[in-house]
Amino acid sequence: MPDLRSQSALRHLQYMLVVLLFIATVGVVGFRLIEGWSWFDSIYMVVMTMATVGYREVHDLSHAGRIFNLFLMIFGVGSVFFTIGTLTQTLLEFELEKFFGKKRMEREIEKLSGHYILCGAGRVGHSAARELARKPVPFVIIEASRGRLEKEPPEWLFIEGDATQEKVLRQAGIERAAGLVAATTTDATNIYIVLTARSLNPRLKIIARASEDSAEKHLRKAGADSVISPYRFAGHRVAQSFLRPNVVDFLDIAVDHEIHEEMIIEEMLVDAKSRLAGTTVGSSYIHRDMGIMILAIKRADGRPCFNPKANEPIQAGDNLIVMGEADKMPMLEAVASGKHA
């Protein structure tokens, strides 16, 4: 993932190669027209001259040919040396960028805490990373394939390595992480990742991808808190699009923030410092002041409360599942976190 400076050096190198090819073509055509040599003799003379080999001329040169060859030596040899210098500079910049970029990324990862680790940069892992970046929340991608990592945005943090290795997970800061996603393409690899991650951080929230239905129980036994099957989800979604199309359309509007930004569903944690703690659904005035509806409350002990009534209490540590306009959500988030009265 080269930066703008490296891209500029690469373009400069391409430009110099075009100039070099142009000068060589002019030299071949010049010897052909001025001296009447064959195409092969003309090409041989140009290569010999621009390579500064120093052999004698293929044939004796006329006065006009010597003048032409003088200019060819000045411009051709100069262009060759300049191109070699540009090539050396480009290669050096790429290597230095790779070295210092890796060191910079390692330092940034060492500073992370409460972040998420995404194991696998395939379609599932990339989609998860895109959603986390949109929030934004800190995350690190672990991927063994360099080709996949080069397709990701340069500002994302990543580690090129095997996520099943304890050393690589420690490098991603698993002891300080809040969650991990095992999203490689094979169930066996995901099971091994979950086992290793759970042994390194027992408090870690782990979500795993399962390609086969039979792998779900093994992933849960390995320590996964949640298992998601993309294929089963896709099949369920297709069936529901036939059976309950309006419900599916509504969920699309509420959940897919990239396509529909007018109405979204979010989750808000009520902090002990928030003015919402100790109120009720009705007395919080969330709907009156912000036009946001509380769909459900998940208590701190994990108990859910769906479609809460106006007298349902709101306590510190509760998670509010709310729906409303996207531009009003930051206001509620500030109130729930206690940063705004």
Image (cartoon, rainbow, N blue to C red):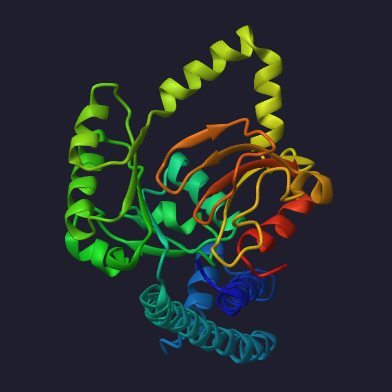
Residue 228 picture quarter: top left
- Quarter of the figure with the C terminus: bottom right
The answer to whether one can see residue 62 in this image is: no
Q: In front: 286, or 30? A: 286
Picture residue at 30% right of the left edge, 55% below the top: 204
Q: Residue at x 21, y 52 (%)?
A: 198
Farthest-out residue, top: 243
Q: Is residue 254 above or below residue 104?
A: above
Q: Quadrant of residue 168?
A: bottom left
The reply to whether residue 194 is in sight is yes
Residue at position x 55%, y 52% in the image: 315
Residue 3, given in percent of the width and then of the height, sits at: 56, 74
Q: Is residue 146 left or right of residue 296?
A: left
Residue at horizontal 63 percent and vertical 87 percent from the top? 75
Q: Quadrant of residue 188?
A: top left
Left/right placement of residue 139 relative to residue 307 reads: left
- Using the image, determine if residue 240 lies above or below residue 260: above
Q: Position of residue 264 (x, y in %)?
A: 70, 41
From the viewer's perspective, is residue 275 above or below residue 197? below
Q: Nearer the viewer, residue 306 or 117?
A: 306
Disc tally is: 0
Q: Position of residue 26 (x, y in %)?
A: 67, 73
Asked if residue 264 is positioned above or below residue 59 in the image, the reply reads above
| Front one among 38 and 260 | 260
**Residue 240, position as x, y percentages in the image:** 58, 13
